[in-house]
Image (cartoon, helix red, strand yellow):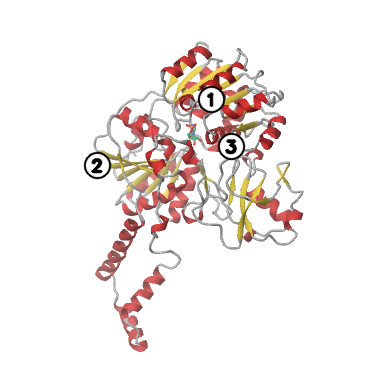
Amino acid sequence: MTESAPLDAQPSFADLLDDERLVRALADVGYESPSPIQAEAIPPLLAGHDIIGMAQTGTGKTAAFALPILSGIDVTNPHTQAMVLAPTRELALQVAEAFASYAKHLPGLNVVPVYGGAGYTEQLAALRKGAHVVVGTPGRVIDHLERGRLDLTTISYLVLDEADEMLKMGFADDVERILRDTPTTKQVALFSATMPSTIRRLASQYLTDPVEVKVHAKTVTAKNVRQRWLLVPHFRKLDALARFLEVEPHEGVIVFVRTKQVTEELAEQLRAYGHTAQAINGDLVQAQRERAVNALKNGSLDILVATDVAARGLDVDRVSHVVNYDIPHDPEAYVHRIGRTGRAGRSGDAVLFVTPRERRLLGVIERTTGQPVTPMDIPTAEQVNARRVEQFEEAITDALATKDVHMFRGLVSKYAESTGVDPIDVAAALAVRAHEGRSFLLEAKDDIVLSERDRGRDRADRSERPERPQRPTPDGMAVYRLAVGKRQRVTPKSIMGALANEGGLGRADFGNISIRFDHSLVELPDPLPSGTESKLSRTRIGGELIQLERDRGARRSGSSSAPRHAGGGRSWDNKGPVRSARTPRRRKG
Ligand code: AMP
């Protein structure tokens, strides 16, 4: 394999962070190397500087401030040590979740999200237990301050996340009011996608000698690569990719994702759709990587699902398409990715999947590469079906031309004569048998439609609010709510284990399981077998009562009333796939 020059040497997480427990947690979530904003922001933050970070969603900015904060928290001190202000409750929840996942190996570290539109009781209880890190929206933070439930006089870190959005949403006075309650000794990090004068003014007033970090991008042109993008809700990405691969004639394809875990999960999902797909990531030894790349070269493999690190320098003429399934962290990574196609003087195609809240990053990519990326639509059921019919016809023509159909012809004709059945019905029956287990045509009602708001907006957290489920809860089942979630580190396995052992439920009783930050939603039989509820009334997971109850619909964190699903019964969460009870286990390697 010909390797082109590697990218500039990047630091590893272990180079940036002293705390091995954080490095381990990052490996657990599958990050292979720091994103540019992380490489730039972590060292000055660890050195105690205030920073202004110009970065938007998708760049990895959350970890850029969360990791230095986590490495400075003293878990034995119960007081609040870090406050993160975010414009929306969705962002607050996401940031809290990110903190919790990076703090996986820091026992006793508490992260509490506080946001408006939700009851006070749970938030107060959580704050009373001691919150090392509080992540909240300005209005609700002020409510808690005024009720004396939150004390910010002890904090060492303050983060203003998406500061431009906060000001745009009219939180300027609230932010200043909160800042007044904090000690002058604290370290401040301000992140903003844009730097209007209002943000500059805020920074000059509340930050001390800040270091400015932003992602620099080198511009490289890839003129022989056609660049397109499509807008897709996060949880329909797999379906959109499957449709794209069906209607778009292609040879080799490299699908880029962010984490090792997703390379493996997506490769497996694509195999389930009938593609030849393999994952390559930083865990593979050189020989395995070469085997995969050679398979892509000689055509025995069509799809490689790769992380940026694993695909560095990959040079395969046969790659007709690069799919940016997860948006890259910066324009430079984008340029590097799309350079994997259009090799050896051929033309290539690059497609970028953009979720509604990542729209701004698309603009940055277009501006820095100086090349237009044209929008395309997600293939509709009609287009997919037209392609399937075409292939069906091709398969018949091909078999008639190249295979010996003599023997079967005799059998069919004998059957038709002896039964009087029309030979066309016989052919149709055989086609049904050939497609058994799969529905041949998609239905228009399953098309991926975006709301006007998602289409039109520049950026919006609200769009990532969990959507209504794609498939309704199966008959005979209902969605139940458990008062434990990611915060208690529950997993689908621990939920199934507890409910099966203590409630007497069997494997077949479980539908999808969706684990949210502070609760979980589980599909269970409706009604539950008698006695199950009382048996489970004292059940705990992670030390907390599960408080099993029928889910009463959207509330609290803006969650929908049921676990969400993508095509094929897979269940997905905001940050990627979450294994449902019915999803097969990920294969290793
Ligand atoms: P953010 O810009 O903080 O919203 O992060 C965007 C996405 O990138 C999130 O899904 C993160 O989990 C993911 N992410 C952050 N840092 C890394 C990294 N170093 N490698 C891979 N994925 C990352």
Q: Choose the circle earlier in sequence order: 2 or 3.
A: 3
- Please tell me whether residue 181 is drawn above or below residue 396 in the rendered image: above
From mark 2 to mark 3, how far is it between C-alphas?
Answer: 51 Å
Residue 300 visible at all: no
From mark 2 to mark 1, how far is it between C-alphas?
Answer: 40 Å
How far from the left and from the top, in percent, is residue 33? 48, 31
- Amino acid type at image mark 3: Gly
Q: Residues within 10 Å of mark 3 (few under 14, many from 20)?
A: few
- Please tell me whether residue 76 is drawn above or below residue 318 in the rendered image: above
- Amino acid type at image mark 1: Phe
Residue under pointer 1: 65
How far from the left and from the top, in percent, is residue 75? 69, 26
Residue under pointer 3: 117
- Please tell me whether residue 238 is drawn above or below residue 72 in the rendered image: below
- Please tell me whether residue 302 is drawn above or below residue 21 in the rendered image: below
Are circles 2 and 1 on residues that touch, CB within 8 Å?
no
- Amino acid type at image mark 2: Ser
Q: Nearer the viewer, residue 94 or 109?
A: 94
Badge 1 residue CB within 8 Å of ligand 1: no
Q: Residues within 10 Å of mark 1 (few under 14, many from 20)?
A: many
How far from the left and from the top, in percent, is residue 491? 62, 45
Residue 3 in which image quadrant? top left
From mark 1 to mark 3, how far is it between C-alphas?
Answer: 26 Å
Are circles 1 and 3 on residues that touch, CB within 8 Å?
no
Badge 3 residue CB within 8 Å of ligand 1: no
Residue under pointer 2: 347
Residue 500 in which image quadrant? bottom right
* Residue depicted at 67% across the width and 30% down the height: 109
Q: Quadrant of the N terminus?
A: top left
Residue 4 visible at all: yes
How far from the left and from the top, in percent, is residue 317? 29, 43
